[in-house]
Each structure stands twice: as structure tokens, then as C-alpha cells.
Amino acid sequence: MIAKRVRMSTSTRQEPRLLSSARFPVSKGLITIGAATVLLFVVCAVFAQSSVSPTALQGMLPIAAVLAVAGLGQMLVVQQGGIDLSVAGAMSLAVVTVTHLPDQNNGLLLPSVLLAVVFAVVAGLANGLLIGALGLNPIIATLGTNALLYGVNLGISGGRPTITTTALQNVMTDSVLGIPYSVFFAIAALVLVTVLVRRTVPGRRFEFIGANPRAARAVGLRTRLHQTSAYVWAQLLYCLAGVMIAGITAQPSAYSGDSFLLISVAVVVLGGTSLLGGRGFPLATVIAAVFLQQLVQFVLALGVSTAIQTVVQAAALAVGVSLYTVDWPGIWRRVTGRRRRVPTATPA
Amino acid sequence: MNEAVAEPKASTTSVAPTLEMRGITKTYAGVAALSDVSVEIRPGEVHAILGENGAGKSTLMNVATGGTQPDAGSILVAGSEVPPLTPRLAASLGIAIVHQHPAVLPDLTVMENLEVALPAAVLRGDGGRKAVAERLLERVGLEVDLQDRVEQLTVAQRHLLEIAKAFAVEPSLLILDEPTAPLGDAAVRRFFGLVREAVDRGVSVVYITHRMAEVRELADRVTVLRDGRTRGTAAVAEVSDDELLSLIVGRKLESTFPPKLSAIGEGHDLVLDGLSGPGFVDVSAKVPRGAIVGIAGVVGNGQTDLLRALAGLETFRGSIEVGGRSRSAKDLLHHAAYMPSDRHGEGLAMSLSVRENAAIAALRSFTTGPFVRRGREQDALRESLGSLSVKAPSMDAPVGALSGGNQQKVVIARALLSEPMLLIADEPTQGVDVGARADIYAILRDASSSGIPVVVASSDTKELEGLCDQVLVMSRGQVVATLTGDEITEERMVSAAVGSRTSALETPEALRSEHVTGFRRFIQGDYAPSALVTAVIVLLAVFISVQNGDFLSAFNLTTILTAATAIGFLALGQNIALLTGGIDLSVGPLAGFLVVVASFFVNDGASPGRVALGLLLMLAVALATGLINGALIRYARFTPIAATLALYIALGGLALLLRPQQGGYISQDFQGFVTLSFGPLPLFFIVLVVVAVLMELALRRTRWGWRLRATGSDEDAARTVGLNINRTVILGYAATGLFVFLAALMFMGQYGIGDPTQGAAFTLTSITAVVLGGTSLLGGRGTFIGPLLGALLLQQVLSATVFLGLGTVFQYYFQGALILVAAIVYTTGRIRRRRRAVPA
């Protein structure tokens, strides 16, 4: 101890500083996507007022809400270094379950929602066990379950759309202060995911396992159990997203989930969550969903081809990812010829 | 000692040294790994390089083989100065190296490993390539079949393979980096004989080792390095063991240590009895209460394995008693705190904050109900981090941004907060600055005084001397000395470790090789999935045609084969991406987009020039897409999924941009051409089969194929072998584009119109076909025949549901079940094999 004191007083700064911790940490992903979204709305307000009209927003927000919920589910899986291609099958199955089974009978809505939840848990366990316990590649396993989910789906629906129940339609499309209820569902999902991951013991362990499974194992955490749970939670969120579609759309298709498959991965990536696993950013993921949907509104309002929106989405994704992976300051220094600290230039 | 270095220069006037390194200096992040090192290797001598861990031996050899560029100094080969070395240039100058960790590719066969690593000329000789290769293996005593997959080889066998590669190029200078570490007695004898033969032929050998016995047996001269400096060079016959030892040890004491245990306390808190496990045997020790026990030895002699067993991360036999009670691996896993030497890989989650890392093992103690209380967590952490004087911008700072010393303190904070029953530290001060070292020593001492048994393994013997009350010296998995009190000196530890003549541990699991022959080799080989899929196709065909004879009608066969042709080309393309260890999500939309492009050019009445222009344009777009995918992955460091997803979305949009609605009929002539068939066999299905066979041959027999699989198998090893990874991957994705182009030609025939929404769905179909064909999504392993068969099976199943009157529901069930069953069968078999082959 004496030796330590001596060294401390001679070689290091005074007293060890007490470390602080922010209550609400702000991630790089949140700043990036948040700023981009604000900028987008400003541009919309200046160049295409109709895209920020109440009608336009009320059209955009429910879809964004669905995408946000699906994105949150995908995020949980991506956090564990996985990817979930069964989003499409899971959402479509939920849609079909809560529209075909009640067949416009409001009384049957609740049981059918419960059945959809059961499907979700079973599908989640299947994915989780195939990947966590048997060690299957996530792409293959979820591709397989996706096909099985569609099998069940077509068994119920025969591939035909049907008219949704009025009860569900009311729950999802009514609005308070001009904000559709579906938005509140998305916010509830966001809060749930955030609190579970950031404030509970299993959630904190979940995040640590995603960031470094080997270290988690060395600490003695049950990595496989948590990896499996990711797929179950994800399925529950896809189920919610499917139910939301079933309420928002008057006559939802039996393939409603397909268009959300890859875009759900895109919002996760745009939100700053790495496809290699690790920390997830729920709020940024939700904002990315709003961003991509508002982009659609903007392009619609400009009156150019709707195809542009897709190309812009792709560009947004590429730029978004490159902000995290490419050392832009380093490239800038190289381009401008300031070679001082470029590691490749000087073998240091 | 400088005279010793200067002395040979006078005598080299007659023959130029094989290799001379003058004044080599290399600095890593301000720390000198080598300072002004000069070594001269004469023709036909065995020159040993001796020194402790971290003395700079491996860095020096990396400089000699072009793996590392020195900051200063010059290199002369055969008397003339050479430009900065690259691995390729070094190889062409006749310098070969046997790496400490063999650079072999697990998914390739022994033969392919030789072929990919050796210049083509080496294998040309009497009796053909196989005969030459067999002679190469025989020379080093490696008894394996050329067709064995390297994955199935033991650690020792892989090492022999690495040695065989080095001898094969008939080098003028052979560098051996700890070559005997994993070898048993007989193999070492044989290997020494081989080295002597080489020397007789005039080859110079640099022999890096920790073992004085080997130096005595083999070397003519010896150079000792310490702290990155040359301590001296001498003829082995003229120097005594004690003299060498005094050169090796004697590092300056850099840190201050806390006082040792003054009086040995009553009782023992940690007792090991007859402990054996993977990598160590029969370790016994009784550690007095309050003592810190050190594990010394040359790196890789079982210390880490022993520590992992103590941490409950490895199974063990024998008993571990902590606090008077015997503990199981599970107890230890949950109640012992382990500080791994690999902080990045196993110690910390670098992307998470200091707070999250420090608190992870103690979260339960901060909860009220289901929630972690911020206040309690922060107070506990603030106190712990403060008492360890961790310097960080804040608790929210990513732990990866901290210095090595502060990172290690976060690991210690985590360990102490979990209130462990045992504290195990592997290399606790590696990469830690001097000031923080003293802190860490004091913390470890405090922990042991407070009653937690502390075990420290370190390659820095000086550190163990200063810190520990008891030291176990390990060599080849066994404890060769137990030192206490005044015996704990650097000299005693080093002489016990380097003087040991123990031979490699023959743990049965680690060293027994799997001898596979005939049928079993086939089952474990790449073609087993293809055979399986073929069998399923045949059985299914028989079953359906029994139910419904029309299934085998010419018309239906043509329909199935035509559809399978398009998917087949797509799958072959996808297969290339998967073989490199990536994936290409953009294949489907690219195919759709190419058809849209074609719908503007390849119409009825269009001039041949216009049609040709359209086809050229399609080809260009396909190749450009592949190049962009590859460039994003290799240069912009996108994950393959992110990169190809961006292209997926973009191509879908571009297709819509060009054709908002369906439109542009493909010319009838063209459609007729691509759907042409001979009887039930479509022309292009034959083309597909021929192409798949040619690709298969290319994959097995050409350098392109080996490179592709090597890259997917183990990128680092492939780079060490000298492959250009960036070029291989980027050209691989371009080739994927080329196959998508061929698939698009088929789709033009099938759909006959530019449809912007067509295509996207085929991405997943292509992946399914490849998976059914048995190509691994981990890369490095697969065939081109498999994906072709996979595509065929998929179309057959689609058709089957129609002919059996089962409806679309069963299409999906069949498809899902096929994928999952195939994946389970292929994956579980492979995991089992992997587990056996993992080095102990």
C-alpha cells in the first residue's frame, strides 16, 4: 500500500476523480439519424409542404409505427449477431390470424390475438432453439421457419385477403389529438424494449452477451439462453406489428409482411446497431423508421416517380452504414494532404 | 557483447552471409520492440535465437520474412542489400518460415493446402503432383492422406504440414519459430534429423526457441535477445548454460511491488490435487492462506489451460478445493472471477461503457424488484472505480477508449464487485503502463490479504518474483518446479522452464488423429449433400410418378428443368458469394433489373446491333453491381448483408424507375432461343450442367478455386500464405454478377416482359438452393454441383405439390422442412467434427 501511495503522488494526477454517468446517454446513431430526420422534415416543410400536412402525416405515421415495431424486434436479434428473415412470415401470419379467424366478428378478435401470440412464441422458440442450441446459421434457420409460417398462413387464409374486424380497425386508426393510436402502440413497444434491455438484469446481460459472447461466457453468463430469448421477444414484436397492420388496413393481404422484411434490417442498421452484434439503439431504430417513411412522403409530394424513394432509401442506408464503418476524417486528411497521423503512411 | 556481434564480420570476407540484418529498430505505439538489433546468419549454420517472452524474437523474424516493416535498419541477402521485404519478395529470395501458429486452411484438404501455398513449380516432378506431395509429407513423417481435410488433423499434424511446406520450397534460409512445441518425442527426433540434412545441403537455419536443451543439440551459434536488444552472439560450444542464462534474465525492475506475505498463515484456502485437463496433467499445490500463487513458464505450456480450468471454463479431473470445500466446474464458473489475458477477445465488451463492463457480474446486488437501481449501481461503481483509481472521461465512456492499464482495472473492478471466492489473473499487466502496474500489484495483494485466494499467471518472471509467495513453474503441461519464499527468483524460474526436458503432453483427445477411409471420408466430404439431394430427387420422382404418371411427361420435365435453369444460375452465383464467407442479397433484384434493361433493347424488330448493345449493357450492369458489392465489403468495411442489402433496395428502385409498370416485350426469337429444348431437355439446362461441372473443376483444380475457398475458410491464414484477399473477394462478387446475368437471360425467356417487381423473391430462393446443396454459410466449403441439385429439388417440390394435389400450403411446408432438415443434418455433423478438431 505504501508503494502505491508513493507512486500515486509522484507520477499521477492528484486525487482519483469520481466518475460521472449520464442519465440518458446519447448515441452516435441517435444523433446521426435524429439530425437527418429533423433535416428531412425541414426540407419537406420548405420544398413539399403537402408532405407535412396533417393528412400526409396521419397516413405516414401508422406505417412508420408498424415498421418501428418490426424494426425493434429485428434489432433484438441483430444485437445477438443474428438476423431474422422470418419477419415476413411472422407478420403475415399474425395478420391472417386476427383477420381470417374472427371473420369480421368482433367477439372473436381477442381469442384470435391470443392465438397469434401463441404462434409467435412457438416460432420464436423454434428459431431460438435451432440457432442457440443446435448452432444453425440464423439466415438458414429463419429462412426455414419463414416458409413454415407461410405454410400455416396459407392453411388458414388460402392466400386470400379478408376484411378486418371493426374493433381492431377502431383500436388502430382512432386518434387522440390527431395522433393515430397505432403510434402509441409503437411508443409502448419502444418503452418496453428500452426498459427491459437497459434497466433489468436479464436485459443488461443480454446486451453484454451481444457485445462479446466470449467475455460473457468467461463471466459465467448463460449465453445460449439469452440468444434464444432474442428470437422469442422478436417474434412477439412482429406479432404486434402484424396485428397493427391488420387494424390499419381495411383488407390486409396474406403477404403483408413481405415488404417489411429487408427494410426492418435497414432501420436497425440506420439506427446504428451493428450487424455484428452488440449494443442496440431502440430509439434510433424507431426514428429511422419514421425517417424512411417520411422520405416516401417527400418523394410522393414532389410528384416524381415513386421509384426514386426506393433509390433514396438505398442511398440513405449506404451513407448511414458508411458513417459507422468508414474512417471519413482519415480519408479527409489524406485527400487534403495532411498526412501527419495517417497510420498507413508512416509505419509507426 | 558488442564485440561478439562484430567479431564474425571480419571472417565473412570469403563467403557472404545468407542473411544479415543491421541495426533493425521497430517501435509499436512508442514502445520499442526491437532497438538496433543486428544478426548475421551464415551459410549452413543453425543459428538459435534465445530469449524470454516478449524479447523481440518473433518480431525480428517477421522483419526477416517481410511480415513487418522495420522503422530503421537494413537487410542484406547473400551480401547485397534488398529493398523493404514483402512476404512474396522474401519467398522469392529463398526465405521460408514455419510459423508458431500454422498458417493452414482448415476447410481445404492437405493436398490443396500444399497447392495453394506452394509455387506451382514445386509440385512438378517425377510421378506427378500427388507423388511429389506424398514425398513432401513422408519427408517430415506426416502420415495422413492427401485428401484428408486439414480440419481433421491434430495440432501436431498441422504443424508438420507447415514444416513440410517450408521444406518443400528448398529454401536457402529456413526460419523455425518454436517448431517443436506441440510435437511428441519421436516427431522431434525426426524433425531434428530433417534440419541436420538441410544444413548438410548448405541451408541456413534460424531456430527460435525457449529451450536450452534444443540449442545445445542443434545449434552452431546462438544470439540472445532481451528487451528488444541483442545481448550477444556466441558459438554454442564456447558458452556455458549459466552464461546463457545470465544473458536471458536480468531485466530491469520497473515497478514497485507491495510487500509479500510476512508470516505464512494457518491453513490453506486453495488446494489442487492431481488436477488434469486439456493441456495440463497432474497439477497439485497447497496455497497458504493469504498467499498469491504464481504460474510461471514459457507461454503456451499449459498455464492458460490450468487457469481456465480454475475458472470453471474447462472440464477437469482431480479436485479443486477453495475455502475447504471441493468445487465443481459449475461452482467455479459462477463464483470465481477470471481475468483473461486476451482483454479484447474475452475480457471486456469493448463497445460498451465502463459502467456496463464493471457492473455485469454484480447486477443482482443492485436490484429492487426486477429493476437495476441506477443510484445503487453508480454509488458502488464510483467507489470501486475510485478506489482502483481508474482514469476515464466518465462511466459512460466506451471501455475500448481507455488505456490498457485502465481497461485492466475495469476488469479487476468487475471481479472484485462480484465478491468472488477465487481470483484468477492471466497476464494481468500485459499491455499495461508502468504506473498502473504498481496499482494492479497492490490491488491483487489487497485482495489476497482480504481472504480471496489469488492465482496469477505471467510470462514476466520478474513480475512473479516481485509479487508471489509461491510459484509453480510449468513446462509442457506439467509442473516442473514449485518455488516458495527466497527460492522465488527469476533465475530459478527461467532455468526450470528452459532447462526442462519434458516432452509434449500426449493427451489422447488432442493427439490422436482420425483415420478416415472410403465411405466415411465420403460422408464427411463435400459431395455427401449432393448425393443426399440426388437420392431425395430420385425417390420423390418415383413416389410422385406412382401417384400421377403425368409427372414424368416430357412437357412437365421441360417445365421443371426450365424453371430450375434460371434458379440454378442464380444459385451458382450465390454460391460464390457464400464460398468467400459472404452473402449476396442483391442477386434477385439484380436479375429483375437486368430483365427490365433488356426489355428496352431485346424487342421484336430490334436490329441485331441493338440487341447486342442491350446484352452488353446487361453484362456491364451485372459486373458493376458485383464490383460495388465487393468494394463496399472490402474497402468500406460493410458487412456483406449491409452492402448487398443496399444494392438490393437500390436495384429494386431503379427497376421501378425505368419501368413503372410492366412493359417492353422481349423478342419472340430470343425467347424461343433461350427456351429451346431437345426432347424434354432444355438447351440451357444442358448449358447449366456443363457450366456447373466446369465451375466445380475450377473450384477443385485451379488456383482461383483454392483462393476462393481459402479466403472463406480462414482469412488470416490465407493472407499469411500470401493470397490477395481483397482481389479474391471483389472478383468473387463480380463472378456472382456474371451468373446473375445468365439467370436474367433465362428469366427473359420465361416472363417475356420487363416487370419491375419480378426478381426480389429469387434472392431467398437462391440461398435456399445453395443451402440444400450443402455449401456452408460460414464460407470455405461447398460445391457447385450441390446448388444445381438444390435448385432442381426446389422446382421438383413445387411441381410435386401440384401433381399430388396438395396445394400451395404444402409447397411452403415442404420448402421449410427441407431447409431445416438439410441445415440440421449438415450443421450438426459439422459441429461435431469441429469440436474434435479444436486444439486442446
Image (cartoon, grey):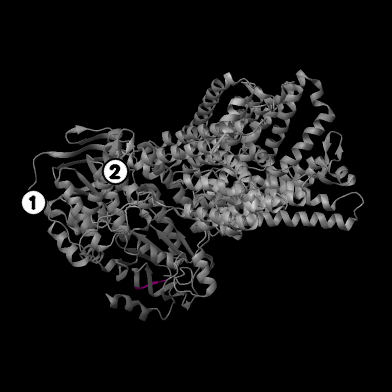
Q: Nearer the viewer, residue B165 or B21?
A: B21
Seen from the viewer's position, the closer of residues B4 and B601 is B601
For mark 1, name the chain: B
Q: Amino acid at mark 1?
A: Ser
Q: State which quarter of the image contains the C terminus of chain B.
A: top left
State the residue at coordinates (23%, 40%).
B420
Q: Position of residue A144 (x, y in %)?
A: 59, 32
Place of residue A318 in the rendered image (x, y in percent of width and height, measured from the top left):
59, 55
Does B789 appear above or below B134?
Answer: above
Q: Which residues are magenta?
A: B36-42
Can the viewer see residue A243 in this picture?
yes
Residue, disc 2: B306
Q: What's the mark number on residue B295?
A: none
Q: Provide the residue designation for mark 1.
A: B262
Q: Quadrant of residue B327?
A: top left
For residue B784, what is the image quadrant?
A: top right
Q: Is A340 above or below relative to B526? A: below
